[in-house]
Image: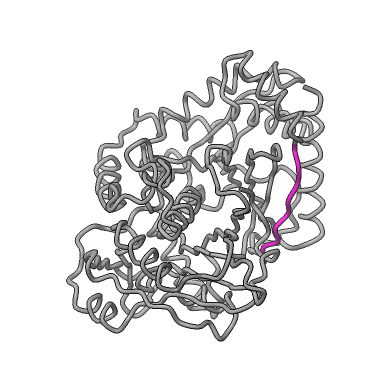
């Protein structure tokens, strides 16, 4: 399992997708509004998509995963797998809409029952990118696309799952594709059977709980304290990528994907041994290296970033939905080696964990409404995601690849991930020479720091 640049996947052969039947479309139209509100992240996403739509921009705010399976796709079995997959997850059966596509309009939700799900195969006559722009979007029911690309030699085909960001996150992509594969192949192994259960804890339950948690936020809440501490370090601003990104007047630019290798399998093994020796998580070692790189490149004695953190817990481990929060991570960089910095990272991660269940919108909203920070903090921070892909077992030869659509950005966000090949890093950065060079310099610096372990 690995992260790739979306441009590196090119479907070959006969391309098929699954679209709602007339019966399913009619069922959705006849369904009453669901009182469950949009999650905070869903609300931001919907507003952003509609703002882009109003300016005539193509929708790219989706995530994708693709696997290679042997043989010719069995359309009947795949149709059953796709429908069972969507039916099992209430979050996938729940679709958002805004009357008149107004970016500031009221967001409505409709959720069809499981027995209304009826997706049928259809040929893809245009490009897959065109398809995803119109199906893997929040107001398409369902807000996803399943695609097969069958090679002419009949030896294999690619299976793609695309989710609008309102419907899923990175873990949803990994578990969702594995679930589709398990349902299609009829795998009877324990992992596959766990994935292919008839129902799942619902993302809508999570959303309702999220709003209850947000209502309880106060000045002494752990998230408020954590964000207040971050702004004290940064001077009241959200963290940026530490090197120039070529952005002019804050205007976002088209995205380019940049990949790099931080550690080969041997070095990754040494880093894991270091983590065990110091009784810390592997992510602690990763963040220590990022902090050292930041200090080395900027001369600053503190590191601050915003981490995209999973909030699933065990209950929602394999549910489909956007189970994330944005949490502040900051610590002093007082030494010159990874080992020197580990204790401060441990403290920072404990603070992050304490704030994990407090919705970021509620934390920042409290600080803004109480006059403690400026509303400009609601801008776009530089964010870091760490993924341990080694937890996910994939069938032999599947070569599961993860990627995103390409929109616009004003920052250089980072995805650090561990898999069988070692430790990799990906960035979505502004597509200009300055940003490319800066990201390459940053990646090389982190690599050198880790190599010294």
Q: Can residue 335 be seen in this view?
A: yes
Q: How many labels does the image show?
A: 0
Relative height, residue 336 to residue 390 (above, below): above
Residue at position x 26%, y 58% in the image: 37
Q: Is residue 192 left or right of residue 59?
A: left
Task: Specify the quadrant that holds the C terminus.
Answer: top right
Q: Position of residue 298 (x, y in %)?
A: 76, 35
Instruction: Check residue 204 for magenta coloring.
Output: no
The chosen color scheme is one colour
Nearer to me, 399 or 46: 399
Residue 71 sits in quarter: bottom right
Nearer to me, 185 or 295: 185
Residue at position x 69%, y 66% in the image: 7
Q: In this view, does 198 lie to the left or right of 63?
A: left
Nearer to me, 450 or 183: 183
Relative height, residue 124 to residue 221 (above, below): below
Residue 276 sits in quarter: top right
Q: Where is residue 389 in the image (x, y as percent from the top left)?
A: 57, 41
Q: Position of residue 45 (x, y in %)?
A: 44, 61
Q: Can residue 386 be seen in this view?
A: no
Residue at position x 30%, y 57% in the image: 88
**Magenta region:** 254-262
Q: Where is residue 225 in the image (x, y as percent from the top left)?
A: 42, 29
Relative height, residue 92 to residue 128 (above, below): above
Nearer to me, 241 or 406: 406
Classified by dominant secondary structure, the portion drawn in magenta counts as strand
């Amino acid at each position: 399992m690995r992260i790739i640049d979306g441009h590196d996947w090119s479907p070959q052969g006969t391309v098929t997708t699954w679209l709602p039947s007339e019966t399913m479309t009619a069922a959705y139209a006849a369904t009453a509004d669901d009182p469950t509100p949009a999650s905070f992240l869903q609300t931001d996403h919907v507003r952003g998509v509609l703002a882009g739509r109003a300016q005539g921009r193509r929708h790219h705010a989706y995530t994708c995963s693709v696997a290679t399976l042997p043989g010719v796709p069995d359309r009947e079995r795949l149709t059953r797998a796709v429908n069972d997959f969507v039916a099992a997850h209430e979050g996938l059966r729940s679709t958002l809409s805004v009357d008149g596509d107004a970016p500031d309009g009221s967001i409505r939700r409709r959720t069809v029952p499981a027995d209304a799900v009826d997706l049928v195969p259809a040929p893809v006559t245009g490009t897959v990118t065109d398809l995803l722009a119109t199906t893997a979007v929040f107001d398409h029911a369902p807000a996803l696309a399943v695609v097969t690309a069958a090679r002419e030699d009949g030896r294999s085909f690619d299976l793609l799952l695309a989710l609008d960001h309102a419907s899923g996150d990175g873990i949803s992509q990994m578990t969702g594709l594995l679930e589709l594969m398990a349902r299609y192949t009829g795998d009877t192994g324990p992992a596959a059977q766990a994935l292919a259960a008839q129902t799942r804890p619902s993302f809508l339950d999570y959303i309702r709980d999220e709003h209850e948690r947000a209502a309880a936020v106060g000045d002494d809440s752990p998230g408020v304290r954590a964000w207040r501490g971050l702004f004290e370090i940064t001077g009241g601003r959200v963290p940026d990528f530490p090197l120039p990104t070529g952005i002019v007047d804050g205007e976002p630019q088209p995205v380019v994907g940049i990949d790099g290798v931080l550690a080969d399998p041997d070095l990754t093994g040494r880093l894991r041994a270091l983590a065990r020796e110091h009784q810390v998580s592997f992510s602690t070692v990763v963040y220590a290296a990022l902090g050292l790189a930041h200090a080395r490149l900027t001369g600053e004695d503190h590191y601050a970033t915003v981490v995209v953190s999973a909030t699933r817990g065990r209950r929602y481990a394999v549910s489909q939905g956007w189970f994330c929060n944005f949490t502040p991570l900051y610590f002093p960089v007082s030494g010159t080696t990874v080992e020197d910095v580990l204790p401060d990272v441990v403290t920072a991660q404990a603070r992050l964990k304490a704030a994990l269940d407090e919705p970021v919108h509620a934390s920042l909203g409290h600080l803004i409404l109480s006059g403690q920070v400026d509303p400009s903090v609601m801008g776009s921070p530089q964010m870091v995601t760490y993924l341990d892909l080694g937890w996910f077992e994939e069938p032999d030869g599947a070569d599961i690849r993860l990627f995103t659509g390409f929109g616009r950005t004003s920052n250089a966000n980072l995805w650090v991930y561990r898999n069988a090949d070692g430790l990799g890093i990906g960035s979505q950065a502004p597509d200009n020479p300055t940003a490319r060079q800066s990201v390459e310099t940053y990646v090389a610096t982190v690599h050198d720091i880790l190599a010294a372990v």
